[in-house]
Image (spheres, helix red, strand yellow):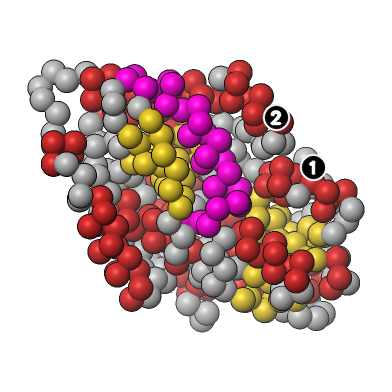
Amino acid sequence: MIGRIVGGLIHKAGAADGGEEAMARILLTLFTAVPVAALAAPAAGQSVADFYRGKTITMAVGTSPGGDYDLRMRMVGRHLGKHIPGNPTIVPSNMPGAGQMLVANWLANVAPRDGTVIVALSQNMPVHQATGAAGVKYDVRQFNWIGNTTDTPNVINSWHTTGIRTIQDVMQRELVVGATGIASGSYLYPHALNQLVGTKFKIVTGYPGGNDINLAMERGEVGGRGSNSWASWKSTRPQWLAEKKIFILAQVGVKRNAELPDVPTLQDLPRNDADRQVLVFISADTAISRPLVTSADVPRDRVEALRRAFDATMKDPEFLAEAEKSKTDISPMTGEEAQKIAEATVEAPAEVRARASALLEGK
């Protein structure tokens, strides 16, 4: 149902470098070192429990440790294994690079296709595929979507020492914001506003993860973050919100969040419908703000088992208690629903995708 809603909204409204190749070769060497028997096709009639019993699932995220993607992945990983038949061990892994595109390409081209790898995928990957962004070597439609932990909006913020309090302020003077890579929302959202609304964001890329950008704000290297989830700010830096050390300038979502009623969405800001359609398009994937996916070609019974294990984890009292203690927003969605949204994004109207592509290329 959610997929149809988002797809309807889209219709209604209207970068990796050479280092990635080297990293892929390293990862290929590491993961092909796994015994051949572990990667071989299962014998006929092997149950899901028999396959996973004694196995290790690698759970990877394309950011450095400490940010919302990483913390969520690790929290889910601590509980997911007990709901998977056979109770495999889940081991977290960080693979930062190219604004999280590196781990998406790794999942598509290097990782085992047997259900022993799960990736906490960046929500921006469907948009980058849909717009033909440089470095895309994956197809999100081929991934098996396991579930999504939240539909919290992303937000752009300023640091209190800048004196910038609203998005209108950024239309009058420059604000330097930190970003991971050009494939990330932390670059995409402020860049889109510069091109379509007339803001004056100066975007500094190359930070390994959101936590690194937070440190850069504290040191005065940058004056804000190009993107972070609203849920992440509440869970990881509630004191900054209470002490007004950060100011939320704009939110990225299909509608305004109830907790941010006075903060404009991206699509509230343009002066014409054509620009608004593009901003609706790049905002729609916030419905799958923090998804988990596994490789293509994983046997259907294992995909089903992973999806149902995710659903059970989202209702697990111990998991929910940990989420509440860490103030982590949990508003889950099934893998089937998340898959439909990803597909709707990639298959959005050609004219909207073309304009978004031109935007990403700076035209």
Q: Amino acid at mark 2?
A: Glu
- Label 2 – label 1 distance at C-alpha: 17 Å
Q: Are marks 2 and 1 in contact (CB under 8 Å)?
A: no
The spot of residue 357 in percent (x, y) is 46, 70
Residue 85, picture quadrant:
top left
Inspect this view and state whether residue 324 appears.
yes
Q: Label 2: state its secondary structure.
A: helix
- Foreground: 12 or 182? 182
Q: Residue at x 71, y 47 (%)?
A: 236
Is 298 magenta? The answer is no
Is residue 26 positioned above or below 253 on the image?
Answer: below
Q: Is residue 277 left or right of residue 102?
A: right
Callout 2: 10 Å neighbours few (<14), some, many (20+)? few
Report which residue position mark 1 lands on.
Answer: 259
The spot of residue 261 in percent (x, y) is 82, 47
- Foreground: 197 or 146? 146
Q: Amino acid at mark 1?
A: Glu
Farthest-out residue, left: 44
Q: Is residue 203 left or right of residue 243?
A: left
Report which residue position mark 2 lands on.
Answer: 324
Q: Is residue 11 left or right of residue 131?
A: right
Q: Give the residues drawn in magenta, as a range.
A: 62-87
The spot of residue 298 in percent (x, y) is 25, 36
Q: Label 1: state its secondary structure.
A: loop
Foreground: disc 2 or disc 1: 2
The spot of residue 22 in percent (x, y) is 29, 70
Q: Residue at x 57, y 41 (%)?
A: 72
Sequence order check, earlier mark of 2 and 1: 1
Inspect this view and state whether residue 341 appears.
no
